[in-house]
Image (tube, helix red, strand yellow):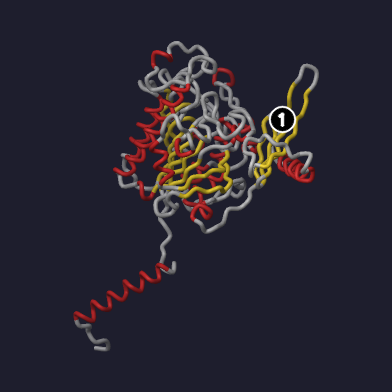
Amino acid sequence: MPYPLLNRRSFFNYIGSLFVTKYLFSKLNIFKEKPSRPNVIFILADDLGWADLSCYGRMDYETPNLDWLAKHGTRFTNAYAASCVCTPTRCAFITGRYPSRTPVGLEEPLNWHKNIGDAVGLDPAMPTIASLLKENNYYTILIGKWHLGYLPKHSPIKSGYEDFFGIMSGGVDYFTHKDALGEPDLFEDEVPVEKNGYITDLITNRAIEFINGNHDKPFFMNLNYTAPHWPWEGPNDVEKSKQIKNFLTDGGSAQAYSEMVRSMDAGIGKVIQALKNNKLLNNTLIIFTSDNGGERFSHNWPFSGQKWDLLEGGLRVPAIVYWKGIVPEGKITDQAAITMDWTATILAAAQTQADSRYPLDGENLMPVITGERNIYDRSFFWRMRDQEAVRFGKWKYYKKQEKLKDCTQEHEHLFDLSFDEREQSDFKDEQPNTLHQLKEAYHKWNAGMLPYD
């Protein structure tokens, strides 16, 4: 025989040396394998302010499940929404592009179905994060709030999601599931349905039902809670809900708000437990954030402004990223991030390419999260019909139009966010060159956006 047989001791010594060698090389990243494509759950709260979770400083109630996610993942302190209202931010996430590049992204926010029908919505031909992942063998599902157009022309099913359960509009009564104009608004795919129950619980239960099912390929779940968006109704407020005539002005309290947030947090805890029970948690990327800053009962400390404002209180939102073994545990990062970054990060993790005809405006943040790249400065742009804003590094330019009886006045400001996150000290006179540079950058960016009608 050309090769002598190994005796028993030599054989085990040989096998042992192979294991040791592979272990040593793995420490040098030579044999390290790329992780398999993860399941993805993107959780979007509705009108949740930056400090409305106990892990961000809320003192009058606790959010233990989101705190757990932050403890075992990475928490962002400088995360922003793409807009200070619902529809544009949702458009930004689903397309991965600034909302002003898309007609529906100009809606601030999209009006009620009874008022506009299907006249405005996300073009079904537009590539979305769902359609791109679906083409790359992901199962796609949206549970919760859509708010990007109404039937028959527009729906999640027409924009890349294989399943949908939730509401089409901006907000519904938590018990009757009717919108602000009294129209029923709860759907299974594109079929209206009636369900009994608190909408937060219905959303949670549908997510758990899906997770408990059979999965022969990775999945992408868009889990869009309606909480804590008005009407402000806690899980036990069914009788109070019958007294509400106007969603915007009637009812609500700090207590109801806390119950809404805690109910959402409890639901997210049940979703995480379902992942554990099905042995899916270890290979699931979870991203949690909000579509804009908080409103009436939100705790907007330490910022000024709220929803509808391009001040920090209207734009700065919580953001938590979890992926066991990939995302560091207990890390807090000051890296600036914006809604479209989550699109780019998810596509990169799922090894999915964007459509070259519609380049992403977001960036994959996983290298920063994992420590492969240092924190770096970003440029972000926002606009509303009456406001403009730019952030670059520590500087923020903000302009607002004030309509008076006989004219419109414009007020410009330059803030240094490195020490003045409440945007109280104006540096426009002391830093004229910086003011000019940010204004020029805004005008250049704005020239590439769609004009308002």
Q: Quadrant of residue 164?
A: top left
- The quadrant in which the N terminus is found is bottom left
Front in this rendered view, residue 6 or 322: 322
Q: Is residue 170 visible?
A: yes
Q: Residue placed at 43% from the left, 15% from the top?
A: 241
Q: Secondary structure at mark 1?
A: strand
Dot 1 corresponds to which residue?
400
Q: Residue furthest left?
A: 8
Residue 217, image x, y percentages: 38, 48
Residue 271, image x, y percentages: 36, 38
Q: In the displayed structure, would residue 80 be above or below residue 248?
A: below
Q: Residue furthest bottom?
A: 2
Q: Is residue 187 left or right of residue 180?
A: left
How many numbered callouts?
1
Q: Residue placed at 66% from the left, 40% from the top?
A: 381
Q: Is residue 151 visible?
A: no
Q: Quadrant of residue 93?
A: top right
Q: Quadrant of residue 258?
A: top left
Front in this rendered view, residue 273 or 149: 273
Q: Residue placed at 51% from the left, 14% from the top?
A: 250
- The quadrant in which the C terminus is found is top right
Front in this rendered view, residue 320 or 134: 320
Which amino acid type corresponds to the residue marked 1 in the rendered image? Lys
Q: In the displayed structure, would residue 17 be above or below residue 163?
A: below
Count residues near mark 1 (Cα–Cα under 10 Å), then give few for <14, some for 14-19, many for 20+.
some
Q: Residue placed at 42% from the left, 14% from the top?
A: 240
Residue 307, image x, y percentages: 58, 28
Residue 115, image x, y percentages: 58, 18
